[in-house]
Structures are given as C-alpha cells and as structure tokens.
Amino acid sequence: MILVVSAGDEAASRLLRTMQLICQHPLLAGSVVDETAHRLILTNGSEIRSVPASAGQVRGWSVDLLIVDEASFCPDDLLLSAALPTTAARPDARIVLASTPWADSGAFHTFAVDGLVPGNEHTRTFRWALQDATWITAEVVESARRTMPPLRFRCEYEGEFAGASDSYFSQADILAAVCDFGMVQSGFGAPAVLGVDWGRQVDAHALVLAGLLADFGVNGRPVVVVPWCDTSRRTYNDQHALIGVLARSWDLQVVSELNGVGAAPTERLLADLGSVRVTGQSSTQSSKENNYGRVLALLQERSIVLPNDPELLRQLGGISASPTPSGGLRIEARNARTHDDLPDALSLAAGGLPVRLADNPLADIPEGQDWLSTAGGIQVPVPVSTVPAAVSWLNAYGTTAACGRCGTIVLASGDKCYRCGAAAGGYVTMHAPPRPGVSVCELDHQYVTGKFPDGCPRCRSLDSAT
C-alpha cells in the first residue's frame, strides 16, 4: 500500500488526479480496477491512497511507501507521531519527504541535513537546483526575484532553508539609498503619501512621507524619495494636530494603521481631514509582506532616496524576517529594543504609491540648482520636492504636446491641433502635463489650457475641472 499525505483536501485530490493520468499511459493501460476520490486500486492488488495532513486521516494505516508532500510545512507532531509510524510494521517500507525548503528547524530540516552526511544508512537527501528546472524561463525567474520577498525567493527558487534571524534589508542596500539632505516638513502643495503608525504603551508614533522625486528627469527612471520622517511619544491630540499641518502643506494621501490602538485615531483622521484621502489598513502578514516587499524592491533597484536620519536607518537595519509554519514571513524588529515604528510607517507610505510610477520627463534645470547624490548613484536636487506619482492616462497612449498657437494639450503623434487646426510641424512644443493652468474635461478627459466659458473646446462640455 502507498499512502500519500498532502497539505489539504484539494492538494490530496490534485495529486490523485495526477496519478490517475499516469495510469492512463499505454504502459499502464487497464491497470486500474477501482478508483474513488481518494483511492486507486491496481490489478496487482496495490492500493494508493491520497489523504490530507490530519491525524484522523493518517493514523491506523500500515504502508509500504509513505510520501509526504510539502513536508516542510507539515506539523512536526503529525509527521513524527502519526505519519512515520505507519511504516513501522513493514520492514522494507520506504519514506519520501518531498518539499520546498522553508524554516531551518523542524523535522523536515533535520532529516534533510542528516541525509547529507556521508555513509548515513537510513536517510539520503536529494536536491534539485533552479538550473535543473529547464521549463522555468529566465524571464519568469527575474520577475519573481523582483516581486517576491527575498527569503521566499531563496526558498521557492533557489532551494535554500530560511534562517530565523535573517535581516530583511541588507545594510549595503540601505546605505546606498541614503542622502544627506535636510528633511522638509513643508511641501508647498507637492503630492506625497503619509504612512502613519500609531504608538502603544511600548511603541512610539511614526510618520513617514514618500513621493516621486522631482529630479528633472536626470535619473532616467522613477525614483521615490522620503522627504521627511518623524517618531515621537507626543499625545494623540498633538499627533493629530501635526498630521493636520502636513495635510495643509502637502497634497496628501494618508495610509493609517488600524491595528491595536490605530482604529480610533484613524476614524478621527477621516472625520477631521475632510477632502484628504485617508485609507485605514490592517497590518496582516500578507499586507506586511506586500508593503515591505515594495520597500525592498525599491532599495534593491536603487530607486529610493532615504534621509540620513539615524533612527530610521537603525530601525531599518534591525528588521528581520522569519518563516512561519503556514509558509509566510513574520516581519518585525529583531528585538524589542530596536523597534519597527518607522519601517512600518515607511512600508505603509510605499504601499500607498501607485504600482506603476510615472516617468519624469527631461526638463530645464533651474540655474544654480544644487545637487547631492546617493552612494547608489541617484542624483538628488535639493531642497527635495515631489511630483505626481500616478501615470497620466494621456501619456500612457503616447507623448503629449502643447499647441504653440492655442496651448491645447494634444498627442504629439497627431498631424494637427484639433482646436485651432494648426499644423503639428511648426506649432507643437513638448511639455509634461499636468501643469499649472491645465484643465481636464470630465466628459472626454481631454487636457486643455486656459479658461473656456463656452465649455471644452473639443466636446463643448461645461463640466470641466482644474
């Protein structure tokens, strides 16, 4: 008898369907005499059972071959006390523990390490590397490398066990992002996302602003900047007052933590900030993986600029990621003395930015503009400022231009201005909308400049907004 143990009912059924397909091969045609949702019986009397990983389903069998799928995620007590004993009564029985590696502890890790010892008579370990999976293309691997948390990528794609004390951010990546500019609390209406982490009895409040760096296009790619951050133990009233000041100074979007004490102050922000977009976010394992993964990707791609704030850098360096039995990552401060308030706020701010960031077009650099740079090669104009991070719908369909005669925003690929009929060759000049004085028609979403009492010059709609 063969017993196959899987993570759950669906996985058990899927594996049995795979075995049914194998039995349809011409070499095995007619070998199945009976089959159910969890069992195959062959003509030679062999029986294959596929069951979920639960003590009730596993206990009581006596098997010749035990296969445990994704054994790294199987609880140790189930594996050692229920699954392995099913082979005890069969002297020639064999056990196969197959799995993606995960935590560097537990029964599967112990067996895997033991099997690497030369001369071990009872256990042998076989490993398959990424290069053995020829059906996985290099493009798929690189996409996974960019989007997955590093520990998860190393486990899923490189076959490594994850250590419980691994740092989430590398010190080299953090230092490559640091720029010694003066933090700016006043944004003068520039757009930004504010990540808000609320303090508890042992934690401090944390605020982090993040936005798309206004760099005149010199970096050739979108770069996120953290113009200002703050951690304190001020009262909740004072913290609300400070957020109000930021909302009046920046074109702000707020992402506020809901966990713990965060629900009530977030509700107050919703009530107090009026037209400011406030989003409450519950911090779950999944949301932390996504938000922290965004910060990690920006750091690794050298696409974020951090202020030289000692507390922010210290806390980022103290973030660790450890595997959980369910296959996730626990991301937190390595110890209670380090704290993770500022990294949590930074991750909320980064997660609130658009998935696709707008490109900064090349623009004229003001005379006398001062510049700094990061160790990672990012050029930073100072004082730092931000520009809209969302991709303009018009830019998504082509390069935009302004008619030199009437100023209407059009696609540069067009042969003439739709409003005044001016030929594109001599009248269209390039610029990057939106800009001050540009309006967008709410009916056909066409950008126009100036005031038009008769409505949109294209569709004549009177419903337009600046």
Image: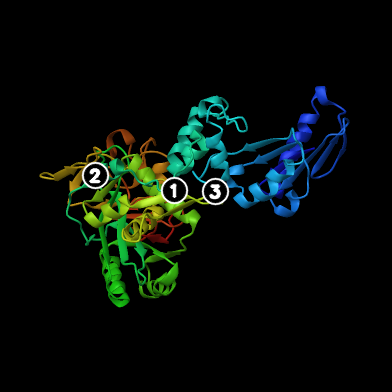
Q: Secondary structure at mark 3?
A: loop
> As drawn, is 357 to the left or to the right of 245?
right
Q: Residue type at mark 3: give it.
A: Gly
- Residue at image position (47%, 36%) is 143
Q: Which residue is mark 1?
A: 164
Identify the amino acid type marked 1. Answer: Ala
Distance between the Cα atoms at labels 1 and 2? 39 Å
Q: Position of residue 126 (x, y in %)?
A: 58, 29
Quick one: quadrant of the C terminus?
bottom left
Camera-side mark, 3 or 2:
3
Question: How packed is label 3: few (under 14 Cα within 10 Å), some, or many (20 or more)?
Answer: few
Q: Which quadrant is home to the N terminus?
A: top right
Res 342 quadrant in image: bottom left
> Residue 408 shows which numbered tag?
none
Q: Is residue 329 visible?
A: yes
Q: Nearer the viewer, residue 454 or 463?
A: 463
- Residue 233, position as x, y percentages in the image: 28, 71
At x 31% / y 73%, what residue is drawn?
A: 240
**Residue found farthest to the left:** 368
Callout 1: 10 Å neighbours few (<14), some, many (20+)?
Answer: some
Question: Residue 293 or 220: which is nearer the viewer?
Answer: 293
Tell which tag, 1 or 3, sits nearer the viewer.
1
- In this rendering, does residue 466 appear at all? no
Looking at the image, tell me whether mark 1 or mark 2 is earlier in sequence order: 1
Q: Which mark is residue 215?
A: 2
